[in-house]
Image: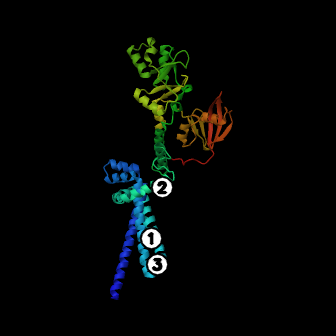
């Protein structure tokens, strides 16, 4: 009889050990599942669901009700962790007495920490998408199984929050959808998954809503315009000499824009007249100028260009004074960078020096300098580099004056009347981001 009792005790011990191991495996499953599902890429799961992956559909449904998912995982993890600890404590207490409680606490702490916490979570955080797809069907089963209990727990939790005056029905996002997208692309760029040019293009596309046409327009001092009252032959010569296909024309004074001439329309008119340029009527060739407010958002202006099937507009202020012009190409360049063709007179206005500084034209837009040099100078208060210096100096600087702000040193090199035409810009602070080759 004594042998039978000893054999029964050994069998019970092995059964208890097997149950403890099973509970640890279940705890590892719940912990790994929680980590994987919360770290899974929503975008990738959405793409897989659209491709017909049923497991991805299950993952997305679980994430859509995140509170119920977390509740089911925590409930399952709590049950198996407490159950395995209690079972091991009772077995060791029966074997070695009251000190078995201490042994059980130490052993279970080590086993749960290593095999139920660190190991599964490390695996899940390194392969979140794969693990999520693998565990999703089982987690859905446990969410359904624990549904009534979780509903009761949620009711208690919501009641507690109401007593404390906390409203959990309103979701407060720290970042907007656009900001979150930009931050995600920046992070992928830092991690090496996205090239700088791709990051800049994506950021430029999202920035169209924040920019207005005045930020990207060609200022009127740089506009190529032609006097409509020039003799026809001289007028044609001016159009041919222009690097642009669309040229504003004025009458009386340069600010009085009366229309826009397209080089192709001019060629058609010359062809219809049999080459008789002397009798060319400029007003008949020109089309009506399109004026847009300087505060128009680039996103809206792009849509307006597409609706009107036009590529060219003149920018005016609130008094109707022409400030400059904006083209479809100007907006596209905010996304893809500078666009140059074989007829462009491309003058960048930037020269890098051996000492790390750059010599820039005062009219160079801050956004272009930031994009080319991967800098982060602010462009909220001024559009050009000269404008930024004047804004910070609160005066029109003299040649040779030096200013330091935003971790950059600005030296005025040349000036024409009240206009800064050339500056030397030198970084003096830590670089914001490592430059790519």
- Going from N to C along the chain, the mark reached first, 1 or 3, is 3
Check disc 2: other Cα within 10 Å, few if <14, some if 14-19, many if 20+: few
On residue 111, which mark appears? 1
Q: Which residue is mark 2?
A: 160
Mark 1 neighbour class, 10 Å CA radius: few under 14, some 14 to 19, many 20 or more = some
Give the residue number, with chain letter if any, for mark 3.
100
For mark 3, does the 10 Å Cα neighbourhood hold few (<14), some (14 to 19), or many (20 or more) residues?
some
Nearer-the-camera pick, 371 or 186: 186
Q: Are marks 1 and 2 in contact (CB under 8 Å)?
A: no
Spatial separation of the CA atoms under disc 3 and disc 2: 38 Å
**Residue 111: percent from the left, percent from the top?**
44, 70
What kind of element bears circle 1? helix
Q: Residue 395: x percent and y percent?
A: 67, 32
Q: Secondary structure beneath disc 3?
A: helix
**Image point (39%, 18%), residue name:** 268
Judged left or right of residue 102, residue 308 is left
Q: Is residue 129 above or below residue 282?
A: below
Determine whether, in the image, residue 406 is placed left or right of residue 299: right
User: Where residue 336 sits in the image (x, y, percent)?
Assistant: 46, 38
Counting the numbered discs, the total is 3
Percent position of residue 251, x then y: 52, 15
| Whole-number angstrom distance, CA of label 1 to CA of label 3 | 16 Å
Q: Quadrant where the N terminus lies?
A: bottom left
Is residue 81 at least partly visible in the picture? yes
Secondary structure at badge 2 equals: helix
């Amino acid at each position: 009889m004594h042998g039978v009792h000893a054999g029964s005790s050994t069998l019970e011990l092995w059964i208890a050990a097997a149950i403890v191991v099973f509970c640890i495996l279940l705890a590892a499953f719940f912990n790994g599942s929680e980590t994987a599902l919360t770290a899974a890429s929503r975008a990738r799961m959405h793409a897989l669901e659209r491709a017909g992956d049923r497991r991805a559909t299950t993952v997305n449904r679980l994430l859509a009700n995140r509170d119920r998912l977390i509740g089911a995982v925590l409930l399952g993890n709590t049950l198996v962790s407490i159950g395995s600890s209690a079972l091991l404590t009772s077995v060791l207490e029966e074997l070695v007495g009251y000190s078995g409680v201490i042994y059980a606490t130490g052993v279970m702490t080590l086993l749960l920490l290593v095999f139920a916490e660190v190991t599964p979570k490390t695996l899940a955080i390194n392969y979140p998408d794969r693990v999520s797809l693998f565990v999703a069907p089982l987690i859905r089963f446990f969410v359904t199984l624990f549904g009534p209990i979780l509903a009761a727990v949620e009711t208690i939790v919501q009641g507690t929050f109401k007593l404390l005056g906390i409203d959990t029905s309103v979701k407060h996002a720290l970042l907007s959808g656009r900001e979150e997208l930009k931050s995600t692309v920046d992070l992928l760029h830092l991690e090496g998954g996205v090239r700088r040019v791709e990051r800049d293009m994506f950021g430029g596309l999202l920035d169209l809503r924040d920019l207005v046409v005045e930020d990207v327009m060609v200022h009127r001092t740089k506009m190529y315009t032609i006097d409509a009252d020039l003799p026809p032959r001289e007028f044609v010569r001016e159009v041919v000499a222009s690097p642009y296909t669309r040229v504003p024309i004025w009458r009386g004074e340069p600010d009085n824009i009366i229309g826009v001439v397209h080089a192709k329309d001019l060629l058609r008119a010359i062809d219809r007249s049999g080459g008789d340029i002397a009798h060319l009527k400029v007003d008949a060739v020109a089309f009506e100028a399109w004026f847009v407010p300087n505060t128009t958002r680039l996103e809206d202006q792009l849509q307006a260009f597409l609706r009107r099937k036009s590529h060219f507009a003149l920018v005016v202020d609130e008094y109707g004074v022409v400030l400059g012009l904006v083209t479809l190409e100007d907006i596209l360049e905010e996304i893809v960078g500078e666009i140059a063709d074989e007829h462009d007179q491309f003058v960048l206005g930037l020269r890098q020096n051996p000492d790390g500084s750059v010599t820039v034209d005062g009219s160079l837009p801050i956004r272009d300098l930031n994009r080319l040099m991967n800098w982060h100078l602010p462009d909220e208060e001024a559009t050009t580099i000269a404008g930024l210096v004047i804004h910070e100096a609160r005066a029109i600087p003299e040649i040779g004056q030096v200013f330091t702000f935003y971790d950059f040193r600005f030296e005025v090199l040349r000036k024409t009347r009240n206009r800064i035409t050339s500056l030397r810009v030198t970084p003096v602070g830590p670089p914001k981001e490592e430059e790519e080759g």
